[in-house]
Amino acid sequence: MKQHFPLKNMQQEKRIYKGRIFFAIFIVITFLLLLICRYAYLQIVHYDDFTTASDKNRIRLQPLPPARGYIYDRNGILLADNYPVFTATLSRTDVSDIDGTIARLVPVLSLTQEDVDRFKSRVKTARKTERLAIKLNLTEAEIAKFSEVKYAFPGVKIETQMTRYYPHGELFAHVIGYVGRINDKELKSIDKDLYAGTNLIGKIGAEKSYEDLLHGTPGYESVEADAHGNVLRNLGRQAPIRGNDLFLSIDYGLQTIAAQQLADRRGAIVAMDPRTGEILALVSSPSFNPNLFVTGISSKDYSGLRDDLDQPLYNRAVQGAYPPGSTIKPMFGLGGIHYGLVDWGTAISDPGYFSLPGDSHRFRDHKKTGHGAVNLHKAQVVSCDTYFYILSYRMGIEKMNDWMRQFGFGEKTGVDLPSESTGLYPSPEWKMRTRKSKWLKGETISVSIGQGAFTATPLQLAMATAITANKGSHVTPHVLRDNKGAKKYSIHNAPDGKIQFNGTEQDWLNMHAAMIDVIQTGTGRGIKGGLQYSIAGKTGTAQVKSIAQGKRYNEASLSSRQWDHGLFVGFAPADKPEIAIAVVWENGKHGGSAAQLARPIFDYWLVTRKNNPLRPANHQVSGGLMTAGIKPGELPSSGGSPASAPVTSNQTTTPAASHATDGVSE
């Protein structure tokens, strides 16, 4: 039997569908009304309550500046320390009227216009969440005064921050340099994230050269803070990474001895290891106290340093360009061998002067009556100018330029210190470019004895001397010996090339022998007494005031600042060099005097240091506040004489000799 199914009731299904739609709409409208009511409750009824709660409790990401790496000498003696100071800081997030707040803080914190200007410069580029330093190194009186009115300065508080301290004052100022407040120019070039929360940056010296290593990597912490910027609780922290510690090649004891030789004098001394290029001592005199610059030097103190006639801020060792005088004769003499113009048997007859063919002008030797028959060896020992006049006439300025530049003259040495001078080794092209005139043959004669337009830095002279000691192997001077920390940085402590020389090794040894005789019987014989090792050296005298043709140098008629410069270069032991030295004594009269300054430095390095090394009193080999036994602020504002540095050794030094050196004039 066929089964029948009933048809769908469409009307009933429509009623059911509509009922469900209305129910869903009702549910949606109901919950929407509830949501609107809740919003109204939160935004209208409790608006003030929740606004206050929002203002008082904020989650912030605060930068944690890294501690700066320490700087040590080659023996682990601390040269640059960190110590805490009280600092007034301001949060941009919590202060709406920054200019007004700073204006009201001026009498409270004794802010100078420099303090205000520095802060306003920094606030322009800083993050909104960053706390900015208003003034570093607050006094107890300033802290007490602020505490009384703290309630009136929401967003401003006193924090402890680390700053730099140089325990040995002016002794290492030109090597280490100093840090100072970040200025407008630096703000444009630095990584804002890397320097978040940091106030100081390296300005000169190793502090500047190795800023990337010393600075470290900042960390961050997430904190809940109230409306006054006070931290309520820490929510999370990423610790900062401290900067690398630097170990310089400088030796504290040698630096002290070198500084003692230049005490109350103007000049520079550079000592380096010819085998590695490590700078063992670098002294520029007079010096200055770098601690003055760390938290901001006063206008009065800076003006005093800037306007000082003796220019203590000027790094003579790296930037000073002096006529090198006869100190370059060993290098120049080897150029004659290189070009085949002379050999060790080639001799000239010295009447006491030289004249160019067809010219009546006489280029005088320092010995009026001349030296008779002179070969290359004797020319070095007695420093015969006439020999080198003739050699330069034969060689010509172009060949002289090509040869002497191999020793580093006229070029930067590549030392890892900023603001190095190139000095000048002149050429016809240089004269035409700078003075728009042709080169004269007489200028070649002057250059041959380190005069005329020829200038060199003490560092260049030390490097050229090291190359001579190395028999032509080139080394690049550097002050960084090692470093330890999170960042990887390698140092090259070895010769990095060799100059092109057509002679033999024996020619280098012959020149060493001539330089040894300079000390034994020649112009440097004033320092030979009691030697326990052999020195190979060369003296030099550089004119400061030109002397007219036919006139003689009359020291009595000149002011002390017009006296000749005294120079000396040398290395020791002569047969196996461990140290090369360059000395420039401004207005020291002659090279024999400069040699007297070098002798105690040789003695300390080769004899005294091994059994009785100089060390600062109460020194430690790990970083930390007052590790040198001197509290920050105890150093005098003008710096102390490095000769008075505290030592634990019984070492005594040979006092620098007077101008008289056994009648030696070079």
Image (cartoon, rainbow, N blue to C red):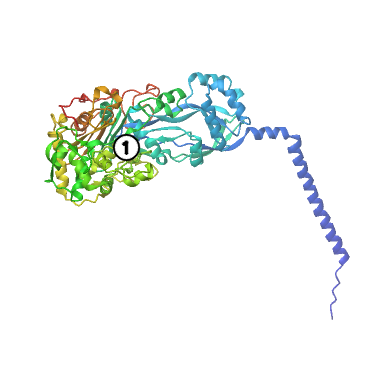
Q: Is residue 536 left or right of residue 620?
A: left
The residue singled out by tag 1 in the image is: 248
* Quarter of the image where one finds residue 655: top left
Residue 296: % across, % down: 46, 28
Residue nearest the observer in this picture, 382 or 418: 382
Residue nearest the observer in this picture, 506 or 646: 506
Q: Quadrant of the N terminus?
A: bottom right
Residue 567: % across, % down: 24, 33
- Secondary element under disc 1, as helix, strand or loop, is strand
Q: How many marks?
A: 1
Q: Is residue 280 left or right of residue 131?
A: left
Q: Quadrant of the C terminus?
A: top left
**Is residue 315 visible from the viewing direction of this image?**
yes
Q: Is residue 347 left or right of residue 318?
A: left
Residue 466: % across, % down: 23, 41
Residue nearest the observer in this picture, 389 or 92: 389
* Quarter of the image where one finds residue 624: top left
Identify the residue at image location x=41%, y=39%. 211
Residue 271: % across, % down: 26, 36
10 Å crowding of disc 1: few (<14), some (14-19), many (20+):
many
**Is residue 627 visible from the viewing direction of this image?**
no
Dot 1 amino acid type: Leu
Q: Is residue 128 left or right of residue 160?
A: right
* Quarter of the image where one finds residue 263: top left
Q: Farthest residue toward the bottom?
A: 1
